[in-house]
Image (cartoon, helix red, strand yellow):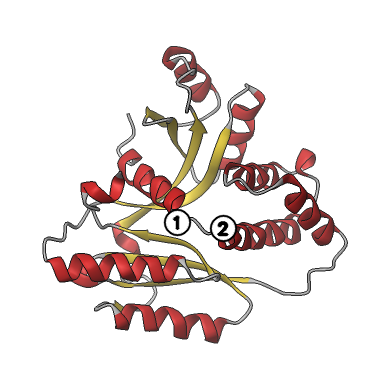
Amino acid sequence: MSGHSKWSTIKRKKGEKDGARAKVFTKISREILVCIKETGSADPQNNSRLATLVQKAKSNNIPNDNIDRLLKKAAGGAEKNDYENCVYEGYGPGGVAVIVDCLTDNRNRTAGEIRHYFDKFGGNLGTAGCVGFMFSLKGIIVLNNEDGDIDEDKAMEDILESGADDFSFEDGVVEITTDPNEVQNVAAELTKRGYSVISADAEQVPDTYTTLTNEEQLKKMGLMLEAMEDNDDVQNVWHNWEMPESDEE
């Protein structure tokens, strides 16, 4: 039912291929630390946003001991780094629109690195808003359905009653679209109803897609995304590249 499921499925599957668990943990750790600082609570039982991030960590096979140590560290005030959110926009090879969402403790360093990635791979870093109008902020929730046990009729009832707008059954998951301001509340309600939430985030979903046919542009676009996603400061890379079928599998 959701017109955004293809994009988010590609993003999810690519994330599964990215591999390095240490880097994944670094990125999620920053999200958790910022969440605790902003909400003032290190208890997932009383913090639905934090509970979703903890579930996200578990879904990425991060050991419970690592998660518990991080929560205790944050609760005790041992984390001294002060991360801030920075968003960069630009164009990749062939005019692909790209939004890079970062959490950094050094804005100048991160800005220089992101500019370097755009330049190196045939793109260019633009000004704030230069591509943002091509995207819509959506709440995207992904439920685990690896075993195919979720009944579609029952799920439709539960999802809509939880306040979501739309959903689709994909390969091993159910993808749900909702108001970005309600994504954590909807995720918390679905968790109460017994569903396993893999992720629940406000995401920039492209309104239209760009297809690349030039082999050099295809190669450079892939390398640019890899370089960005390999950077510890980068939390998300959103783009409107309609990735080749081989990249989805």
- Answer with left or right where residue 160 lies relative to residue 221: right
Disc 2: which residue: 24
- Relative to 20, say whether 140 is above or below: above
Is residue 212 left or right of 11 when viewed as pictured?
A: left
Residue at left offset 76%, top offset 43%: 44
Q: Nearer the viewer, residue 63 or 54?
A: 63
Q: Which mark is residue 1?
A: none
**Amino acid residing under circle 2:** Val
What x and y, as percent, mark residue 195? 58, 26
Badge 2 marks a residue whose secondary structure is helix
Q: Residue at x 66, y 59 (%)?
A: 29
Q: Is residue 226 visible?
A: yes
Residue 87, relative to residue 166: is it above or below? below
Mark 1, residue position: 18
Residue that appears at 66% across and 46% down: 49
Circle 2 Cα neighbour tier, 10 Å, few/some/many (<14 / 14–19 / ≥20): many
Total marks placed: 2
Q: Quadrant of residue 115?
A: bottom left
Q: Are marks 1 and 2 in contact (CB under 8 Å)?
A: yes
- Residue 147: x, y in percent? 48, 23
Where is residue 141? Give x, y as percent. 50, 38
Is there any visible trace of residue 40 in the rendered image?
Answer: no
**Going 33% across and 78% down the picture, which residue do you hit?**
118
Q: Secondary structure at mark 1?
A: loop
Q: Nearer the viewer, residue 216 or 136?
A: 216
The amino acid pointed to by label 1 is: Asp
